């Protein structure tokens, strides 16, 4: 098997294990916060927003640093670092006795974890540019499959064994994934060494500053739109059921189905990016996500809510890997660690704002209004994607004559 494919499949499997470890417990943090003593509705909504917002702060600060270190010292090392931190901090969270302790540990997770960014950098650096859409789409499915398996089993474990044991099992899963990384993952492109990936180090088309800024803006809006709903789905389920008893299992099923839908999109829809304009594909998927998420505000039961939530997650699940593919094929492989670091920084800014906005909406109106707000913001993201695509097209056309002129001079020389 070709080395880049072997690495892709191994990373895919290890990321499923890693993300399943996080998914085993983190979706149920709103219930864990209640267990440590926060039961007032307004205070609970505020803490759920803060705990979910603090992780991307550390992740955003450190992502460019980890990206630079990945390009300089190796991507595999960054995956190992992230998985060790994930295992230790998940296990430590099981001993938290106060919401402040949960908050601090989530902050540390942001600073030292981030397995997805590290793994995506390794995959993109060793993949031929003509297969980037396939590779990054396939890789992104590992995140969603892990999020599908983790909450499904974790919800049952949390319901019958308790949240603390669920965190410990999640930490052990992280440790298991780490072993596979240490044994099976190979560094294909390190410090510009002669490997397969060096053939593809020259991007087919460079991204200028304006195009870069427009795409990064899309990442910000996308991550904001994606992260508005998930932190408060557990509280919505609890409200519909009228009790916390049994809610963990229900949330596990809903989260798993939504993640499985997003994984399916990553395997199927993203591959269309190898045959059509990736930015056009992004806009189409965002429009579908907006239309499918709008009915969530009006659903009264869990069955109809689950159907539209899963369909919306399917539509939006292909957007980020499509953008990553667009970015990566225009960036030399030996600089993709920096690229993913900057991208993560911007995306984390959107992730940070989303739970805080959700907390404000839930306390000002109601939790169900969060889903209406999410649909409206996905619509804003769709409109921005059209603007970004138009701007990039104009910039590309204006730069073509100069590039052609430079090429003709080089040929004449």
Image: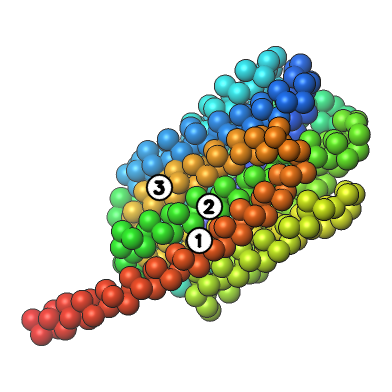
- Give how far apart the Cα atoms at labels 2 and 1 are: 8 Å
Residue 221 tag number = 2
Place residue 48 in its image quadrant. Answer: top right
**Which residue lies at the image location 61% right of the left edge and 63% below the top edge?**
286
Residue 85 at what x, y percent from top left?
A: 54, 30
| Foreground pick, 351 / 110 | 351
Label 2 with label 1: CB-CB less than 8 Å? yes
Q: Quadrant of the C terminus?
A: bottom left
The mark that comes first in sequence, 3 or 1, is 3
Q: Nearer the viewer, residue 130 or 387?
A: 387
Can you tell which quarter of the image residue 265 is in? bottom right
Task: Work out whether residue 271 can be spotted.
Answer: no
Q: The residue tagged with tag 1: helix, strand or loop?
A: helix
Mark sitting on residue 384: 1
Residue 342, which numbered label? 3
Q: Secondary structure at mark 3?
A: helix
Q: Is residue 412 left or right of residue 295?
A: left
Given contact means CB atoms under 8 Å apart, are the residues at marks 3 and 2 in contact? no
318 lies above or below 154:
below
Q: CA distance from mark 3 to mark 1?
A: 20 Å
């Amino acid at each position: 098997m070709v080395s880049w494919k072997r690495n892709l499949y191994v990373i895919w499997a290890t990321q499923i294990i890693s993300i399943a470890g996080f998914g085993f417990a983190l979706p149920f943090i709103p219930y864990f916060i209640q267990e440590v003593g926060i039961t007032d509705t307004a205070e609970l909504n505020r803490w759920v927003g803060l705990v979910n917002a603090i992780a991307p702060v550390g992740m955003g600060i450190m992502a460019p640093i980890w990206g630079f270190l990945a390009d300089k010292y190796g991507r595999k090392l960054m995956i190992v670092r992230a998985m060790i931190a994930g295992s230790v901090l998940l296990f430590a969270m099981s001993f938290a006795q106060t919401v402040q302790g949960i908050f601090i540990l989530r902050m540390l997770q942001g600073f030292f974890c981030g397995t997805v960014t590290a793994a995506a950098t390794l995959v993109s650096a060793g993949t031929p540019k003509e297969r980037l859409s396939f590779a990054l789409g396939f890789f992104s499915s590992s995140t969603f499959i892990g999020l599908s398996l983790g909450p499904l089993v974790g919800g049952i474990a949390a319901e019958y064994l308790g949240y603390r044991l669920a965190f410990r099992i999640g930490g052990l899963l992280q440790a298991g994934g780490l072993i596979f990384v240490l044994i099976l993952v190979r560094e294909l492109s390190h410090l510009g060494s002669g490997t397969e990936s060096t053939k593809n180090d020259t991007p087919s088309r460079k991204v200028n500053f304006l195009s870069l800024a427009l795409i990064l803006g899309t990442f910000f809006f996308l991550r904001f739109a994606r992260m508005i709903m998930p932190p408060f789905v557990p509280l919505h389920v609890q409200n519909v059921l009228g009790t916390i008893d049994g809610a963990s299992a229900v949330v596990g099923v809903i989260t798993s189905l939504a993640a499985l839908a997003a994984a399916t999109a990553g395997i199927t829809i993203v591959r269309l990016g190898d045959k059509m304009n990736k930015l056009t594909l992004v806009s189409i998927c965002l429009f579908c996500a907006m239309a499918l998420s709008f009915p969530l505000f009006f659903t009264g039961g869990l069955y109809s809510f689950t159907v539209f939530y899963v369909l919306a997650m399917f539509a939006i699940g292909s957007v980020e890997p499509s953008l990553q593919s667009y970015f990566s094929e225009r960036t030399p492989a030996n600089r993709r660690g920096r690229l993913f670091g900057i991208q993560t920084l911007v995306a984390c800014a959107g992730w940070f704002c989303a739970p805080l906005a959700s907390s404000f909406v839930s306390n000002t109106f109601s939790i169900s209004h969060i889903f209406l707000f999410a649909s409206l913001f996905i619509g804003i993201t769709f409109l921005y994607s059209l603007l970004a695509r138009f701007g990039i097209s104009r910039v590309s056309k204006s730069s073509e004559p100069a590039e052609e002129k430079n090429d003709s001079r080089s040929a004449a020389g």
